[in-house]
Structures are given as structure tokens and as C-alpha cells.
């Protein structure tokens, strides 16, 4: 088996054959942007990259050809303090895009199929949901309830039996199928990096 890796550096991502010492393709990033996280699902290569000012983008390339399939501003897809953790189902990806919102996006074209609220947010409510794909079911859970999401339409309804039998209060980590392990870890690293950067700007000089 050939030793092939995907490497990111400032302004570009490269697919490199370590046996023949040649680049199979080089994909350009916006000028001044540096890759921070790379994950792959089938032929889809997702790259999170940002510039020195902290402006982030999410790009999707074809892993086989290096062609750019789509690109979005990070803060267009994900709300404040929300980290991109894709769940892949078929040729689509699902991700949390707000405290009670999630988005379905086509991997091949980047078209946003829908953006839905899991439930109507009430005034002064701080409830937030996480989403997970288990078996053939996409579910959302908060510290109060569990809801089933219809993958085709995005509509959700509370699962009274599961909510009653499984105590979700206090859950701090989770894993289902359809989740890229690398993406989850990369997202965590992004979060830690952002928190460290924020702390460095607020800590007074000694």
C-alpha cells in the first residue's frame, strides 16, 4: 500500500505520496489562511482554516482530485460558541448550527438542504441541544428531553419513553455512528485553541 498523506500549511493543502516523493495535487486556500483541522469521509475532505485575525472558513475538497467542492465562512454555518462537528449520513452532513438549531448540507454541492430549530426557543431559556446519530435514527437531546429528528424533513418530536427511561442530565461527552472521530477531536482542539487565545488577551501582564 502506498504511503499517502494529506498535509496542510499556510495557503494550501497537499496530497503527497511519501513513497515517490511527489505531490498528487495541491489545493489553494484563501491567501493568509492556515489549516487547523482536516477530516475525511468517503471522497469528501473537510478543512477548517483561518487567518491571523481569527477569520475561519470551512472548505470541502474532493480527496481524489483536490477540486474545491464548496466553501463557507465558519460563522455563517455555526453560531457563536458553536463548534463544527459533522455527522455524515449518505451524501449529506448534519451539524449543530446553534443552541437549538441544526443544518443539513449536501456534501457534493454544498447546498444547504434545510436549517431547522429543534424546538421553539422560549424567552430567557438557556436550553441547548446536542445531536447524535444512533442506528438509523438522528436524535437531539438536552438536559431535559430527547427528541427524534426526521432526516428527510428535519421535523422533530419528543420521545417521551426514551426521555423517561434515560437520564440525559449531566451528559458531557457522547459518540454515535456517522460521526468522524477525527472531526470530533479536531473540533475539540479548535475549541481549546480559541479558549487559550481568549485567555491570553484577557490575562493582565505580570
Image (cartoon, rainbow, N blue to C red):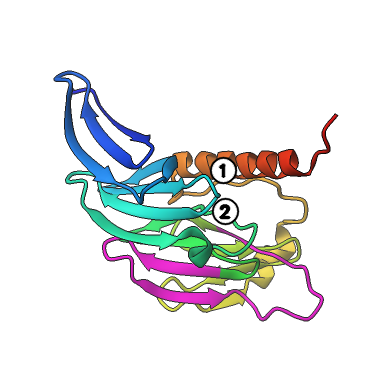
175 sits left or right of 27 in the view? right
Task: Give the secondary structure at mark 1.
Answer: helix
What is the CA distance from the residue labelled 1 to the residue labelled 2?
A: 8 Å
Q: For residue 94, which quarter of the picture?
A: bottom left
Residue placed at 17% from the left, 18% from the top? 19
Magenta stretch, residue numbers: 102-131
Query: Is residue 13 in sight in this rendering?
Result: yes
167 sits left or right of 51 in the view? right
- Residue 190 is labelled as 1
181 sits left or right of 170 in the view? left
Percent coordinates x, y for residue 197 in the rendering: 66, 41
Q: Residues within 10 Å of mark 1 (few under 14, many from 20)?
A: some
Residue placed at 17% from the left, 20% from the top? 21
Query: Is residue 138 in sight in this rendering?
Result: no
Which residue position is annotated with label 2?
83
Percent coordinates x, y for residue 54 in the rendering: 55, 50
Residue placed at 35% from the left, 60% from the top? 71
Going from N to C along the chain, the mark reached first, 1 or 2, is 2
Percent coordinates x, y for residue 26 in the rendering: 22, 40
Q: For residue 165, which quarter of the picture?
A: bottom right
Q: Is residue 31 magenta?
A: no
Amino acid at each position: 500500500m502506498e504511503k499517502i498523506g494529506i498535509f496542510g500549511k499556510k495557503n494550501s493543502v497537499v496530497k503527497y505520496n511519501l513513497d515517490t516523493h511527489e505531490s498528487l495535487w495541491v489545493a489553494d486556500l484563501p491567501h493568509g489562511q492556515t489549516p487547523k483541522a482536516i477530516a475525511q469521509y468517503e471522497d469528501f475532505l473537510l478543512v477548517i482554516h483561518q487567518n491571523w485575525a481569527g477569520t475561519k472558513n470551512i472548505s470541502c475538497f474532493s480527496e481524489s482530485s483536490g477540486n474545491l467542492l464548496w466553501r463557507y465562512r465558519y460563522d455563517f454555518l455555526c453560531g457563536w460558541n458553536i463548534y463544527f462537528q459533522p455527522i455524515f449520513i449518505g451524501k449529506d452532513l448534519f451539524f449543530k448550527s446553534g443552541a437549538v438549531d441544526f443544518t443539513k448540507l449536501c456534501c457534493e454541492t454544498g447546498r444547504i438542504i434545510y436549517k431547522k430549530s429543534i424546538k421553539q426557543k422560549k424567552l430567557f431559556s438557556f436550553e441547548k441541544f446536542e445531536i447524535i446519530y444512533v442506528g438509523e435514527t438522528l436524535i437531539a437531546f438536552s438536559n431535559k428531553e430527547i427528541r427524534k429528528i426526521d432526516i428527510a424533513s428535519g421535523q422533530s418530536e419528543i420521545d417521551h419513553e426514551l426521555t423517561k427511561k434515560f437520564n440525559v442530565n449531566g451528559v458531557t461527552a457522547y459518540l454515535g455512528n456517522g460521526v468522524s472521530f477525527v472531526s470530533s477531536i479536531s473540533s475539540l482542539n479548535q475549541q481549546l485553541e480559541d479558549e487559550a487565545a481568549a485567555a491570553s488577551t484577557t490575562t493582565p501582564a505580570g
